[in-house]
Image (cartoon, helix red, strand yellow):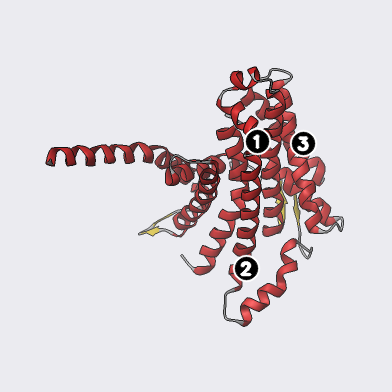
Amino acid sequence: MTLYAAMGALAQGLVFGLLALGVYLTFRVLDFPDLTVDGSFPLGAAVSAVLIMKGVNPFMTLPVALAAGMAAGFVTAFLATKLNILNLLASILTMIALYSINIRIMGKPNIALINKTTIFDSFDGMTAFFKAHGVPASVVNPILFLVMIILVKILLDLFLHTELGLALRATGDNENMIRAQGVNTHTTIMLGVALSNGLVALCGALMAQYQGSADVNMGVGMIVAGLASVIVGEAVIGEMTVFRATLGVVIGSVIYRFAIAFALSLRIGKLHITPSDLKLITAVLVVIALTLPAVRDKVKVGIVRTGEGGE
């Protein structure tokens, strides 16, 4: 793997950490299976791209994309809580609706941001500084994404330790118990799902500006990638506090992207991996991550028994 490919994988792993954090909120914190992700990711990209095409400051498009994603998440939670539609079905309905909505927003299936200013153009001076000191320009984007994901992680950690955040976590742990304490669980679910999809849409907006285009199909499989990042992170970090959990999610996202990049660069004789194999690679990674904790526990038990036998 070349340095350029490694920096690209690192940058993608960090920015997709936002998506992974969003998936973590619904699947782990709220215990709410949410497939809206596949629709809210391109929603954020579409909103950001359209606003940039209209001459809006690229930085200002990010909070708008965040708000759009939160609105999508709110709709899913509203369907599930107020209309009593099964969680998974509610998210599927929203995801399907978002496909048409995203095309409506863009006016066509895709938008290319050719010769348009993005947030990355604001850091050309940093790129020139690195080049002048012999540092590859490819490290600039990973640094920017690292600062961004650290900021978001800190804010999310702080939120989950507030009274409202604790209520949200308690809703996922035991909804009946927290409802008996006087907490409106419908409100916490709507807040959590909205925040989750807001982070996903923000990730989509950043990716649209990073790759220079937005496409209505760019969200396909994002929920699987997000779950893979969460599961891989949990397998690496193990049992955890909120701080370690969110850290593990980000680390899992980076590991996942490096695994993808490594697989694509792998050559074994005439056999080589193509982009069409990415879904297969993801499935294998998730299987490995799911079985790793059990294997690790068995190894520990075997070591303990061996030690006891030696005594």
Tell me if residue 108 can be seen. Answer: no
The numbered mark at residue 71 is 3
Per the image, label 2 sits on a secondary structure element best described as helix
The mark nearer the N terminus, 3 or 2, is 3
Between 233 and 277, the residue placed more toward the observer is 233
The residue identified by callout 1 is 165
- Relative side of 254 to 212, left or right: left
The numbered mark at residue 4 is none
The mark nearer the N terminus, 2 or 1, is 2
In x, y percent, where is residue 188? Answer: 69, 29
In x, y percent, where is residue 174? Answer: 57, 23
The residue identified by callout 2 is 140
Tag 1: Cα neighbours inside 10 Å, few (<14), some, or many (≥20)?
some
Report the Cα–Cα distance between label 2 and label 1: 34 Å
For the point 83% across and 52% down, which residue is it? Answer: 51
Quadrant of the frame with the C terminus: top left
Tag 2: Cα neighbours inside 10 Å, few (<14), some, or many (≥20)?
many
